Image (cartoon, rainbow, N blue to C red):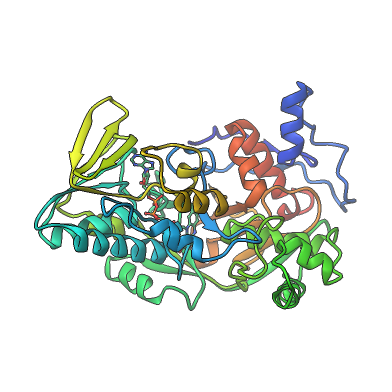
């Protein structure tokens, strides 16, 4: 989507919660003028209108219902194994949530796809007709392995495109595609995947300098030491507690604005809700050092999908199995029969009953689905005529005030394109996804208030 070239008024006090309350009560949306909770030297008036504005809505997208799975406090990594256990050797669940070593990641999805394919191949009685539900990375990798082993494979995908939670979108008038799904990694993570992307013609975007923004302007970046220390202490505890409880027990002040910004950064990069996330199995705590991919990240999925029989725009609504095979019912009412099926729909879809299973999944699978958490991340991608900001720092943290989107990436220094990417995670991301475009634009602009130079 895009917005018209008008000036966006920056409304202090117009965070997601403020906007949602206004929507609920019918009150006018908070106005730009008076209610800033933090004193400012010179009140900003407006953010220049972006020439291009795109946003993700993974949290409400019926074929995702989340971004990355994670372990809530009290749960255990073995739940993922339980989810991946073959069901009567007919049905195999796969996808990032089923991978125990690298869950919530693209590499976890690859591993899960391979593992499910290996299990189906081991169960098969000679060459068979096998279905794969979902054409994300796990599904296409699984289908490729099955086809290479001599099986007749049909991939059935609900969307009108492949790639799932990997989604690069062409931005008209720019050669920098907008990345609305996975495209970032820590510098040491995923070297193999990055090598693959480079071999497919993508290049890297180094984002390796961080800065903070407060009501008083640019300031030092975040210090994640309190969080690391709280996690270290909680690791020795008798029971697993959520990250925010771990911080409280370690004596941290949960009202501290810098700590809130640290938690927002953790949520934006991992999808976890700190009030739920396990401190025994915490998310990756990244430093201000990321590597982004420049180009169509979907190339990695397209490569696995080459030559496969893929039915797009075909949501599967029911998966039935018995001793003789698997039957899939599509949203159109059509039914298809196979010897076996690998189902790679995301955890969020399983949790919300997006696919019916007959008979019901075994209790261990249902237990795992209920206990694991589907984390949320949303992205806003803004391209401007020219930068209105005056820093070369690539990673920004908005500290204080009521910004909904506290993590921003400045792509201008690394790409020459005046692009800002906002990342929001956890509960705030779910609230952001629920906003209509007009309100989302408003809270996006309000989140950048501190970055607008005084007097602009
Ligand atoms: C905003 C965001 C940021 C991320 N950041 C990172 C990161 O920095 N690093 C990292 O490693 N990972 C990241 N991830 C996670 C990564 O994208 C996923 O782990 C991975 O892409 C999941 O692949 P998958 O095949 O398991 O699932 P998906 O890609 O979701 O594929 C599942 C497929 O099933 C389809 N489907 C759903 N329901 C049905 C149905 N009823 N019938 C038929 N098809 C259906 C979907 O449309 C989809 O194509 C991020 C994800 C998001 C959303």
Residue at the top extreme, as displayed: 26
Residue 70 left/right relative to 105: right
Residue at the right extreme, as displayed: 39
Residue 72 visible somewhere in the drawing:
yes
339 versus 61 height, above or below: below
Residue 217 visible somewhere in the drawing:
no
Q: Residue at x 64, y 53 (%)?
A: 388
* Residue placed most toward the observer, 325 or 17: 325
Image position, residue 306 (x, y; %) = 18, 55
Image position, residue 69 (x, y; %) = 52, 56
Image position, residue 141 (x, y; %) = 27, 59
Residue at the front extreme, as displayed: 323
Quarter of the view holding residue 200: bottom left
Residue 54 left/right relative to 91: right
* Residue placed most toward the observer, 429 or 184: 429
Q: How many marks?
A: 0
């Amino acid at each position: 989507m895009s917005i018209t070239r008008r000036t966006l008024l920056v409304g202090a006090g117009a965070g997601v919660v403020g906007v949602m309350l206004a929507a609920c009560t019918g009150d006018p949306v908070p106005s730009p003028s008076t209610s800033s909770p933090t004193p400012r030297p010179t009140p900003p008036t407006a953010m220049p209108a972006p020439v291009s504005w795109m946003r993700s809505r993974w949290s409400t997208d019926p074929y995702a219902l989340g971004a990355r799975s994670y372990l809530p406090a009290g749960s255990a990594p073995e739940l993922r194994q339980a989810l991946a256990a073959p069901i009567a050797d007919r049905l195999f669940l796969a996808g990032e949530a089923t991978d125990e070593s690298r869950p919530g990641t693209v590499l976890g999805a690859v591993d899960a796809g391979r593992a499910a394919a290996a299990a189906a191949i081991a169960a098969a009685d000679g060459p068979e007709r096998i279905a794969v539900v979902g054409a994300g990375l796990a599904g296409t990798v699984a289908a490729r392995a099955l086809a290479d082993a001599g099986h007749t494979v049909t991939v059935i995908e609900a969307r009108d495109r492949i790639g799932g939670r990997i989604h690069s979108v062409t931005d008209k008038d720019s050669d920098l595609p907008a990345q609305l799904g996975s495209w970032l990694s820590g510098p040491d993570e995923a070297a193999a995947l990055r090598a693959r992307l480079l071999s497919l013609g993508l290049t890297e975007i180094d984002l390796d300098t961080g800065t903070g923004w407060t009501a008083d302007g640019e300031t030092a970046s975040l210090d994640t030491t309190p969080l690391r220390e709280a996690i270290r202490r909680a690791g020795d505890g008798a029971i697993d507690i959520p990250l925010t409880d771990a911080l409280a027990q370690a004596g941290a002040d949960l009202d501290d604005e810098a700590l809130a910004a640290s938690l927002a950064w953790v949520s934006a990069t991992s999808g976890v809700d700190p009030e739920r996330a396990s401190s025994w199995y915490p998310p990756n705590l990244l430093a201000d050092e990321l590597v982004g991919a420049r180009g169509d990240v979907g190339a990695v999925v397209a490569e696995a999908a080459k030559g496969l029989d893929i039915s797009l725009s075909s949501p599967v609504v029911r998966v039935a199995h018995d001793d003789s095979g698997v039957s899939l019912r599509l949203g159109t009412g059509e039914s298809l029969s196979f010897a076996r099926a690998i189902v790679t729909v995301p955890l969020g879809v399983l949790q919300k009953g997006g696919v019916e299973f007959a008979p019901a999944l075994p209790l261990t699978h249902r237990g795992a689905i209920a206990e694991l958490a589907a984390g949320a991340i949303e992205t806003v991608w803004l391209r401007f005529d020219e930068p209105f900001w005056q820093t070369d720092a690539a990673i920004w943290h908005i500290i204080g005030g009521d910004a909904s989107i506290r993590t921003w990436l400045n792509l201008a220094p690394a790409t020459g394109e005046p692009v800002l990417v906002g990342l929001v995670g956890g509960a705030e991301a779910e609230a952001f996804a629920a906003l209509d475009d007009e309100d989302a634009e408003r809270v996006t602009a309000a989140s950048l208030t501190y970055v607008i130079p005084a007097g602009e």
